[in-house]
Amino acid sequence: MSRILDLLVRHRVAAAVCALFLLQYAVPYPALAVNVLIWGLFASGYNLLYGFTGQLSFGHAAFFGAGAYGCGIAMTRFGLPWAPAIAAGMALAALIAAGVGFFATRSRGIYFAMITLALAQCVYFVFYQAQSWTGGENGLRGVASGRLGLFGLTLDITNPTVKFYFVFAFVALALWFFSRILASPFGAVLEAVRENESRARACGYSVAATKWVSLVLSSLFCGLAGALDAIHLSVVPTEVLHYQTSGQVLMMALLGGAGTFFGPFVGAALFLLLEDIASAYVSHWQLVAGAVFMCCVLFFPAGILGSLVRWLRR
Amino acid sequence: MNQAPIVLSAERVSCRFGHFTALKDVTVRLRAGELTSIIGPNGAGKSTLFNVLTGALAPSEGRVLLEGKDLTGHRQHEFARHGIAKSFQITNIFRQLSAHENVRVAVQATWSRFDMWRPRSRMTELIEQADRLLELVGLAACRGKPADSLAHGQQRSLEIAMALAGDPSILLLDEPTAGMSPEETRAMMDLIVQLAEGRTLVLVEHKMKMVMGISRRVIVLHHGELLAEGSPAEIRADAEVRRAYLGQGVQ
């Protein structure tokens, strides 16, 4: 068993891509699979900062939302094609993260969380007020036309299968980048900072700079997820910047297993499936999510995937 | 007699915490290649001086000079990058990581801090150097064990391996034998003597007996002030030191 596990860990990108490919057959309808991909990517980006660098952020909605609005504004207001629009979304997310990080990385623990929350709320209100750009409370409408050009080809993303593979390609590429970061020397520095800040400092690492770079990298993944969400929904609702979005991504990362490579996708899948199933029977499905979340924290503190790996390794 | 050049010095350093003065106008000069011990009774200001010399604490007054260059107010990781390494009084390691990864991360700090592309598993030089350091402190057998699972003495040795990672020219150890068994203590003292070869080494120690046999120079602090400074023989003969250490048996 542990040999299979070692094999999966060594080829984690291939294993993750296979699992996500099979996902489309495991969920009731394709749009849900796309949601899992997007939220899983968002939660992975969150996981880089929270699970691997050990910094609790309550403000990641700002980066997801910036990615969505950046991409949407680039397409609707500037008429850019989808590819540069996605890049614009990621750039906007990274820019905001650079600013948030400038203040937040000077603190730690709950203060870090509070500063990210406060600054994310500032971002929310700026976008909310800038009506002529963002559509204000109505959200930004008419983002993707449904047909995306690709080297002379036309991708018809109104077809759910095409849309799934479109998003899937980005997620697979992002997972590969993610894995490389974790396996690099910098990945070791992130874990060192998570494990023991004062020791990392004594080794000669700048803890604040490491956290800042981690936050900006994290925001690139979250921004990509946001940009894909904008294309997926063809609208950017203001909720993407709401603090509930920050809470939801934290919940997904914790459910699946913070600090594990694939955990955030497991968490996102569980969360969204739960939402889909429970909301058909009860009007306040969040009650069910809350109960499941509490059980998880009590019985699987390392998250579902994290606990599973620990149990298999025994 | 002391002809070796001064490498690290604290010049007229004072440290105040509110109304409490932990260090009062203390000057210490550390010479290249010497093993210097800083001793004193509890609360004498040893750890404060240690923190000032390693950059963990900025002095309220005075300066810290490294080879004549003013490092006062520089941050701790900059001190580390200038070749000043330290161990902690309270064991300070990456508990969840393996012994080897602890040292490897410490070695890596001198090579690459922001490389996020190449796989670290292929950086064989880094891995081998970490193995050499583990071997040096006698932990080669514990390579893959989580640092948390090591015995106390082994964790202290691990810390020293980490402190040696950047091949520092100056090594400061804060009570390296604290809480150790007699056998562990002997092994640690042997290691310290070995490390002092070709390196400036500073030992902060509460137990006076321990350092007398191995130190070239001894600095005695008392109530935050410099009480005496000299060779072990001079310190043994010093009447004031005897008074400060009354009942602790100066031998």
Image (cartoon, coloured by chain):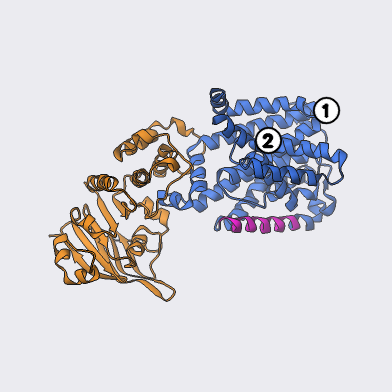
Chain colours: A blue, B orange
* Residue pointed to by mark 2: A265
Position of A195 relative to B236 (above/below):
above
From the viewer's perspective, is A135 left or right of B94? Answer: right
The numbered mark 2 sits on a residue in which chain?
Answer: A
Magenta-span inclusion, residue A120: yes
The numbered mark 1 sits on a residue in which chain?
Answer: A
Nearer to the camera, A188 or A148: A188
Circle 1 packing at 10 Å, graded few (<14), some (14-19), many (20+), is: few
Compute the Cα span from label 2 to label 1: 23 Å
Which numbered mark, 2 or 1, is in the foreground of this view?
2
Query: How many numbered marks does the figure carry?
Result: 2
Answer with the quarter of the image where residue B78 lies: bottom left
Circle 2 packing at 10 Å, graded few (<14), some (14-19), many (20+), is: many
Magenta-span inclusion, residue B63: no
Magenta segment boundaries in residue numbering: A108-125
Nearer to the camera, B23 or A33: B23
From the viewer's perspective, is B76 left or right of A16? Answer: left
- Residue, x 71% and y 49% (percent of image)? A247
In terms of sequence position, does the residue under pointer 2 or pointer 1 come before the other?
1
Answer yes or no: do the residues labelled 2 and 1 have beta carbons within 8 Å?
no
| Residue A220 visible here | no
Identity, as a three-letter code, of the amino acid under mark 2:
Phe
Image coords of residue A122 (percent x, y): 71, 58
Q: Quadrant of the C terminus of chain A?
A: top right
* Residue pointed to by mark 1: A159
Give SS at disc 1.
loop
Give SS at disc 2.
helix
Nearer to the camera, A228 or B181: B181
From the viewer's perspective, is B31 left or right of A249? Answer: left
Identity, as a three-letter code, of the amino acid under mark 1:
Asn
Identity of the residue furthest to the bottom in this view: B19
